[in-house]
Amino acid sequence: MIEKIMFGTTGHLSTRTIFGGAALFNANKTDADRTLETLFEYGVNHIDTAADYGDSEMLIGRWMKQYRDKFFLATKTSARSYKEAKSSILRSMERLCIDHIDLIQLHCLIDMVEWEQAMGKEGVLEAMVEMRENKLVSYIGVTVHGLEAPKMLMKSMERFSFDSVLLPYNYPPISIPEYKSDFYELVAKCRIRSVAVQTIKTTARRLRRDNSKDYSTWYEPLMEQCDIDKAVHWALAQPEIFINTVGDVNLLPKVLDAASRFIAEEYPSDGEMKAMVVNSGLEPIFPVT
């Protein structure tokens, strides 16, 4: 089974691998049923999805009708205004077949104009706080993609006491000195404030170079179990982070299998990861400016 640790100040012991609902973007009911069985097999008890993830919320909603008490459930909205946010979040609740969201997140809040709107008067954050006061949601988080993620998340944390953050974490961007410095500064601040740190793109290989149907992610993922093992074990060696799993239902079992075999004292060395960069062609998937 996969290790569980406290998810920030929520009081919930979450598996360190969180099911990333993006994997169900274009999935069908058969895919979803198979995925649920996989989550149960590995004891995954935390789901993260978003309003923007195609049919994901509706497919997860089928699970919630019977298994709501088995999962800490998080979703996201890309709305930036109060009115749009309330409508989006209520629609997510309807699609998920629930009357309460454990964690609602501002989705990919990186553009400064959008940031000011979201954080300001009549912004999405105001709607989230109101919904928390009305006990429709319990916790509030923020997510950012790209190499500016750590900086933007620290900026957001100065404006509001978020319960969680989410950002990219795999070997290629951590090889960029500025990203590495900013990432670990963010982690240190989150540790002090007991903010949960979720990470994405653990098993990303590089940007797509073809139109392969072998995987459903927008980037090329690692495919071989040995490579996935190294990437997952390297990430889990950072003790307080959570990994949001890969956006492909067929690769999901490989990621969870790797996580289930993680041993803290045996994570890959820096030399092994550098060799993997060369041998498997790992590259940053977000633009380096």
Image (tube, grey):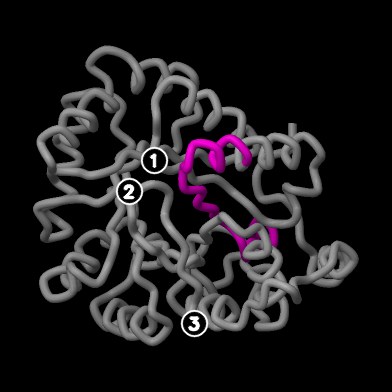
Tell which of 199 and 275 is nearer to you. Answer: 199
Assign a secondary structure to mark 2.
loop
Which residue matches tag 3? 253
Instruction: Check disc 1 and report its element: helix, strand or loop.
Output: loop
Horizontally, residue 184 falls left or right of residue 214, namely right
Foreground of the two, 47 or 14: 14
Type of residue at label 3? Pro
Q: Amino acid at mark 2?
A: Asp
Q: Is residue 264 above or below residue 79?
A: below
* Closer to viewer: mark 1 or mark 3: 1
- Considering every residue shown, the one lying at the far top of the view is 121
Residue 95: image location, x then y, percent: 15, 56
Looking at marks 2 and 3 on the same chain, the residue that comes earlier in the sequence is marked by 2
Quadrant housing residue 83: top left
The span picked out in magenta is 188-208
Q: Which residue is mark 2?
A: 52
Q: Nearer the viewer, mark 2 or mark 1?
A: 1
Q: CA distance from mark 1 to mark 3?
A: 28 Å
Q: CA distance from mark 2 to mark 3?
A: 24 Å
Q: Which residue is mark 1?
A: 163
**Residue appearing at x 69%, y 35% in the figure:** 182
